[in-house]
């Protein structure tokens, strides 16, 4: 069976997943309502592929695979038609994810798996909107997708065993290492990663040290590849805030978003993509 994969949402994560999917040899469509986001994705993917080739991490054939296997769509029905995989990477809202996946379920091939790249939301809750929630699963990728080795596979309460096996197999097909994690808020990654990020912001508020020093503390003292504030800039302060709000609601006070995070997001300083976060980019 030819594997056809539709990626919904051409933001940082969606375009990264689409790049890896096509380079891995799968016929891939990338959908976004916004034509400018699609154009930006096309350009970013081309740059990333060249970087991967120049670093010797991506095979030369990747250029042809991107040209031959990846197509860009601003019509959802066209993007999902005939797909046996749909992976959504739209903003962190259960309502939005439900709506998108419901529409994708109508247009995708019979038996298609419907996956969400959510970093923290309940897969069971998202899947409730589907006619067949046994086909719904979480597949959580990490930024930058072409570089990061992990995919968190998160079955909801209704997900079938066969769908779990297919998700594990697809993650391996993408060259990633899958881990299967229980459907709990923030799974195994965001629940831990966000704690560190939020505490680093509180330390900045408390004047413990500057952003550079706090990041250096973790980079040189703990060998993290990137300090927690720089990482928050990479992920997006708005994305981190949405995750923290959800975890605060579900898991309690330790995830309360710091006021500084709220203020920076309100000012539009959402990190690298905006040119300003904890750092100027
Ligand atoms: N394609 C393939 N490989 C590439 C590549 C590309 N486009 N660009 C770079 N690489 C490879 C490089 O060859 C290099 O490989 P080696 O280490 O084997 O030499 C590696 O990726 C690192 O690349 P760079 O040298 O260019 O960059 P760097 O060393 O400054 O690292 C980084 C950059 C990978 C982002 C690193 O700082 C890092 O790992 N940071 C932490 C990232 C992280 O934690 N991400 C998760 C965020 S949370 C999330 O995404 C989930 C969520 O729910 C929000």
Image (cartoon, helix red, strand yellow):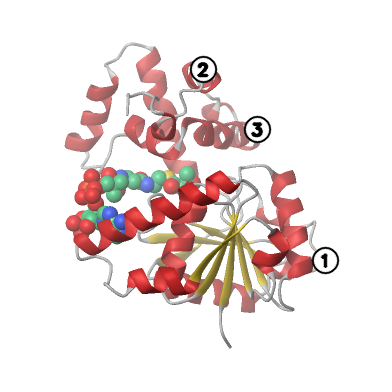
Residue at mark 1: C-beta within 8 A of ligand 1: no
Q: Residues within 10 Å of mark 2 (few under 14, many from 20)?
A: few
Q: Which residue is mark 3?
A: 249
Q: Which residue is mark 1?
A: 131
Find residue 53 and report its image quarter. Answer: bottom left
Work out whether mark 1 precedes mark 3 in sequence or the reverse, and give the earlier one. 1
Is 35 on the left-hand or right-hand side of 277? right
Find residue 67 and report its image quarter. Answer: bottom left
**Do tag 2 and tag 1 residues touch (Cβ < 8 Å)?**
no
Task: State which mark lies toward you, 3 or 2.
Answer: 2
Above or below, comparing residue 145 to residue 178 in the picture: above
Cα distance in 3D space between marks 2 and 1: 41 Å
Q: Residues within 10 Å of mark 3 (few under 14, many from 20)?
A: few
Q: Position of residue 268 (x, y in %)?
A: 51, 22
Image disc number at residue 237: none
Q: Nearer the viewer, residue 251 or 30?
A: 30
- Residue 158 makes an appearance in the image: yes
Residue at mark 3: C-beta within 8 A of ligand 1: no
């Amino acid at each position: 069976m030819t594997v056809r994969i539709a990626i919904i949402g051409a933001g940082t994560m969606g375009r990264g997943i689409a790049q890896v999917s096509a380079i891995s040899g799968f016929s891939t469509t990338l959908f976004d309502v916004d034509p400018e986001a699609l154009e930006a994705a096309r350009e970013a993917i081309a740059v990333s592929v060249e970087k991967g080739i120049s670093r010797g991490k991506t095979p030369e054939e990747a250029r042809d695979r991107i040209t031959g296997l990846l197509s860009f769509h601003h019509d959802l029905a066209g993007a999902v038609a005939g797909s046996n995989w749909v992976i959504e990477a739209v903003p962190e809202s259960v309502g939005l994810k439900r709506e998108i996946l419901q529409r994708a379920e109508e247009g995708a091939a019979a038996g298609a798996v419907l996956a969400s790249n959510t970093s923290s939301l309940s897969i069971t809750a998202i899947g409730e909107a589907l006619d067949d929630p046994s086909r719904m699963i979480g597949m959580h990728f990490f930024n930058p997708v072409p570089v990061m080795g992990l995919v968190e596979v998160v079955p909801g309460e209704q997900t079938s065993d066969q769908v779990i096996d297919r998700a594990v197999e697809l993650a391996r097909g993408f060259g990633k290492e899958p881990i299967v994690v229980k459907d709990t808020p923030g799974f195994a990654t965001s629940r831990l990663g966000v704690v560190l990020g939020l505490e680093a912001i509180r330390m900045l508020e408390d004047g413990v040290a500057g952003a550079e020093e706090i990041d250096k503390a973790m980079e040189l003292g703990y060998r993290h590849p990137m300090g927690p504030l720089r990482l928050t800039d990479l992920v997006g302060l708005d994305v981190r805030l949405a995750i923290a709000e959800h975890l605060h609601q579900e898991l309690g006070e330790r995830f309360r978003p710091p006021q500084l995070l709220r203020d920076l997001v309100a000012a539009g300083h959402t990190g690298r993509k905006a040119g300003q976060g904890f750092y100027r980019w």
